[in-house]
């Protein structure tokens, strides 16, 4: 039963990852009349949905009691301000990363993005060794080197990329590549930092995600105001939103549950 649950979880994770990348890429390249939706607002909405989802899970763990839910949130978040503030650093990095992923998928094809983004496994390994004092064996390091070589070969130009280059200029490909590489490093650091916090405290992962989501929403709204404030004031916060946009937001909210960079996914195969 345990093995079946693991395979089921793996299948759901693969489906969520693939569907998120494909729908996000399609939503950023789909040509429609009117303004395109703002990725900065989509990040904020996804954070708010994560908060709601985690609050519902805490409510379930509290035996569906509103009084118990209020007590847990008050005791674990409001009464522990220093513990809550620790989440500001990874939350800010997560928010930056989520915006970078939209930039990357707006400038790279889905396959190149998906393969290149796997470098986050390498960066997570490096940060795990340096920050958590984890030790990796020879086969594990060899696997990471093979992964890095595979990503390098994917970026190697070939004749089959001529048709794709007509749609994407060299400049846009460079922007997309830099965005995804930056996201990989931010993913590794923030994920290991978050894992370290989880190991040092007894708070549940749902409480931690509520704290992350709260800071992420604040940082996200700051980004909306700074970079897209004029567009929001002109066309509204939900400009360009359609059914596909909401699917992207929901998938981003659900993948993965603990957060997009949680390094706890890294040791699955190492």
Image (spheres, rainbow, N blue to C red):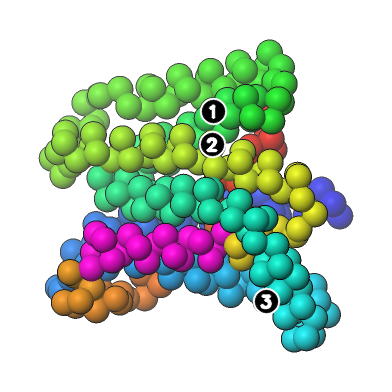
Whichever of callouts 1 and 2 sits on the residue coming sooner in the sequence is 1
Give how far apart the Cα atoms at labels 3 and 1 are.
34 Å
Residue 56, disc: 3
For the point 54% across and 42% down, which residue is it? 190
For label 1, the residue is 122
What is the chief secondary structure element of the magenta stretch? Answer: helix
Q: Does 70 appear above or below 35?
A: below
Left or right: where 176 falls relative to 97: left
- Tell me the quarter of the image containing the C terminus: top right
Q: Do the residues under discs 3 and 2 have CB atoms within 8 angstroms?
A: no
Q: Is residue 32 visible?
A: no
For the point 62% across and 46% down, which residue is it? 194
Residue 188, disc: 2
Residue 221 at x, y = what percent? 37, 66
Q: Secondary structure at mark 2?
A: helix
Q: Do the residues under discs 3 and 1 have CB atoms within 8 angstroms?
A: no
Q: Secondary structure at mark 1?
A: helix
Give how far apart the Cα atoms at labels 1 and 2 are.
8 Å
Q: Please provide the residue range marked out in magenta.
A: 212-229
Q: Does 251 appear above or below 49?
A: above
């Amino acid at each position: 039963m345990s093995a079946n649950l693991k395979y089921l979880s793996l299948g759901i994770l693969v489906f969520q990852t693939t569907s998120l990348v494909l729908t996000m890429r399609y939503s950023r390249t789909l040509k429609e009349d009117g303004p395109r939706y703002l990725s900065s607002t989509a990040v904020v909405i996804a954070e708010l949905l994560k908060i709601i989802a985690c609050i519902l899970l805490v409510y379930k763990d509290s035996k569906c009691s509103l009084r118990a839910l209020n007590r847990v949130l008050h005791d674990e978040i409001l009464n522990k301000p220093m513990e809550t503030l620790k989440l500001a650093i990874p939350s800010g990095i997560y928010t930056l990363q989520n915006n970078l992923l939209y930039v990357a998928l707006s400038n790279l094809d889905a396959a190149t993005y998906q393969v290149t983004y796997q470098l986050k496994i390498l960066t997570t390994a490096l940060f795990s060794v340096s920050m958590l004092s984890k030790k990796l064996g020879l086969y594990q390091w060899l696997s990471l080197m093979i992964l890095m070589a595979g990503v390098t070969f994917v970026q190697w130009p070939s004749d089959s990329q001529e048709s794709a280059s007509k749609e994407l200029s060299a400049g846009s490909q460079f922007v997309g590549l830099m965005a995804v590489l930056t996201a990989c490093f931010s993913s590794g650091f923030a994920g290991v930092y978050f894992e370290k916090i989880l190991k040092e405290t007894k708070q549940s992962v749902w409480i931690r995600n509520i704290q992350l989501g709260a800071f992420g929403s604040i940082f996200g709204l700051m980004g909306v105001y700074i970079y897209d404030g004029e567009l929001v004031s002109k066309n509204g916060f939900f400009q360009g939103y359609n059914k596909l946009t909401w699917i992207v937001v929901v998938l981003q909210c659900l993948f993965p549950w603990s957060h997009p960079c949680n390094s706890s996914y890294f040791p699955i195969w190492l």
